[in-house]
Amino acid sequence: MSENPEDQNPEVDEVVDYMDDQQESAAPRVARSVSNQPLISEEQEREHSGGTIPSRPVRRPAPRARRMSLSLTRVDAWSVAKVTFMLSIAAGLIQIVAAGLLWALLNVAGVFDQITQLVSTTGLDASGLDLANVFSLSTVLSAVTIFSIIEVVIFTVLITIVALLYNVVSSLVGGIHVTLGDD
């Protein structure tokens, strides 16, 4: 028995023989650049491979850009409704956060107090007007939240109706024709 475990396993010998056969039968591979030019010269390739290289390399045609004409003839109304609903919810959340930040900025800048003082200097009855209480943070956020909920419903319904109208119109005129290119 030899101490080399590969000598004891006949399957390893078969794999090694198979790989030797594959290397002998395959032509040497040449690394090429993006412009399809060899990265090494023919002399260097002959020295490296030890064999002869055919005098005429195979010339491949330059790849052409693929173009594909497509027509958008139908839009699934349910999928449009789902996407519009999710985007409207995202827009509503952004509006609520923006309104809260704007209110905080105006409050820190003292705009509400300045407007109350401006009204009192004009001689109007300012005792009943306290802009900080009228436009409190909870009042502003509640109003913006209600507006955002109404906005979500209206946008979802309107965009879904537009998708259904698009399906009707595209069945009459054939849809939108788009040419996509692989440039």
Image: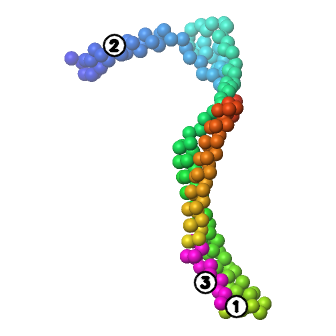
The C terminus: image quadrant = top right
- Secondary structure of residue under mark 2: helix
- Secondary structure of residue under mark 1: loop
Q: Earlier in the sequence, mark 3 or mark 2?
A: 2
**Viewer-proximal residue, 167 or 94?**
167
The reply to whether residue 63 is visible in this rendering is yes
Please give the name of the residue rendered at 59% of the width and 18% of the height, measured from the top-left corner. 30
Q: Which residue is mark 3?
A: 133
Type of residue at label 1? Ala
Label 1 near label 3: C-beta < 8 Å? no
**Viewer-proximal residue, 30 or 93?**
93
Residue 129 in the image, given as x and y percentages of width and height: 66, 87
Q: Which residue is mark 1?
A: 126
Label 1 near label 2: C-beta < 8 Å? no
Residue 103 in the image, given as x and y percentages of width and height: 63, 74
Q: Which residues are magenta?
A: 128-141
